[in-house]
Amino acid sequence: MSRFQRVAVLGSTGSIGESTLDVIARHPERLAVFALSAHSRIERLAEQAAASGAPVVVVPDTAARERFRAAWPAGRPLPEIRVGAQALADTAADAACDTVMAAIVGAAGLPAALAAARAGKRVLLANKEALVAAGALFMRAVREHGAELLPIDSEHNAIFQCLPRGERAGAPSEPARGVRRLLLTASGGPFRRHDPLDLHDVTPEQACAHPNWSMGRKISVDSATMLNKGLEVIEAHWLFAMPPERIDVLIHPQSVVHSMVEYEDGSVLAQLGQPDMRTPISYGLGFPERLDSGVGPLDLARWGKLEFETPDMQRFPCLQLAFDALRAGQAACVALNAANEVAVEAFLSGRLRYTWIPRVITAALEWQQRQSSVTLDSLADVLALDAATRAYAGNLGLA
C-alpha cells in the first residue's frame, strides 16, 4: 500500500498550485495538505487554506500576514502563519512534510526547492529556475540527501514516463541506457504563424493568449517567445544527464504529444494526453502508482491529425539563446533566466516592446561573458550572479 503523504504546495495560488489542490482533494485517503504559500494573492490563500484544512501557511511579510488574518473566516481556528523567505525554506524542509510541490515562479522559488532536496523530500519540481540557475548544485543535493525528484512540467514528466522501466526518481549521472535523444514538444504559442516583422507592437494581452494551456502571465509570455521551451531544454539536460546535442525541440500545435524519447533501435516512445496539468501532477503525487487526476479521456479521432514542425529560430530567437547559454555553461544560464525575468516584467508593465525581450537577454549574456571567472558552488553564489544580472538588465535603458 502506498504511503500517506503530507504535501506542501509552494505557490498554491498559481495555476499549478490550484491544480495540485484539486488532485489532492480527490484522494483524502492518501494525500493531505501540510502547508500552502502565496506571494500576493493572500485572500485566495485564505480560501484555499480554509477549504483544504492546511495547518500551515507561509506569506512574504507582516502586511500579508495581517491581510490573511482579515480574510480568514470568523470562528474557525487560524492556521499557523509563517512569514518570510527563510520560513518558506524551513517549511519545505519541515519534518512534518513528506512531499513538496515546488511551483513558485522565478528565482524566488529556488531556496525553498533546494531546502526540500537537502531535507530528502519527494520534490515535485514545477519551478524551472531550480535547474536553470542552479542545476549542478540542485542535482548534487538530490543525490547526496536521497531526495526523490519528479518533474512536473508536462514535457519532462512525459520524458520520465517514456524512459526505460526501473529509472528511479532522482538525479542520474549519465543518460538512460539505449536512449538516443529527447524530443521536447512545444505548441508554438500564439505567434507561430506570425511574420517576425509583425511582432513589434504585440500587447501583453496578445502574448498571454495561449492557444492550449491556462497559465500565469509570465509563463504565457515565455511560451510566446519560446524562452520557456529553451528553459525546458536546460532542465532536460540536468534531469536526464543529456548533452544539448541530443535534445531537440519540435513544434506540435495540438499539444497532445507532450514529449518523446527516441531509442538507439529507432523506436520512439511518446506520452499523449489532454493539455491539462493535473495529469503530470497526479503522476508525481502517486508515483510509482497512477491516481485519478480528474482529466477526461483523450479522443484522438476528434483531433483527426497531429502536426509537427521544426521551430523557426528567426521567429523564436529566445530559443536559440537558451541553447547557446546551455553550451556556454551554468553562469550563462543564470544570466539568461535573470535577464528574461527583468525583460518580461518590463513588457507586461508596458515599459518594453515584445521584440526587445531577446535584445535584453542577448545584452545580458554578452555582459556575463565579459565578467571574470564566476564560481557557482553555493546558493549564495547563484543568487549573487542572479542579482547582478538583474541590476545590469534593469539599467540597460531598455527595461
Image (cartoon, rainbow, N blue to C red):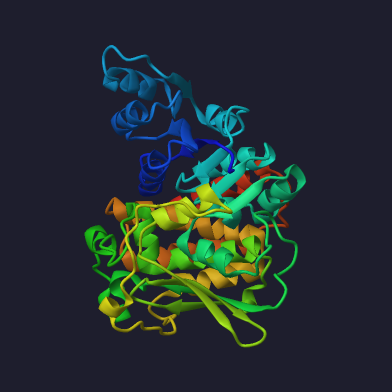
Identify the image quadrant of the N terminus: top right
Image quadrant of residue 55?
Answer: top left
Tell me residue 16's x, y (percent): 40, 48
Residue nearer the viewer, 352 or 130: 130
Describe residue 368's horizontal placement relative to residue 361 as left or right.
right
In this view, which residue lies farthest toward the bottom?
A: 266
Describe residue 184's horizontal placement relative to residue 120 as left or right.
left
> Does residue 188 lie above or below 288 as drawn?
below
Residue drawn 35% across the image and 48% down it: 15
* Count of numbered marks: 0
Describe residue 341's horizontal placement relative to residue 165 as left or right.
left
Residue nearer the viewer, 12 or 96: 96
**Residue 396 shows up from this direction:** no
**Residue 330 shows up from this direction:** yes
> Does residue 91 lie above or below 188 as drawn?
above
Tell me residue 252's x, y (percent): 39, 77
Residue nearer the viewer, 385 or 238: 238
Residue drawn 53% across the image and 31% down it: 88
Image quadrant of residue 269?
Answer: bottom right
Identify the image quadrant of the C terminus: bottom left
> Does residue 32 lie above or below 375 as drawn?
above
Tell me residue 240's x, y (percent): 65, 65
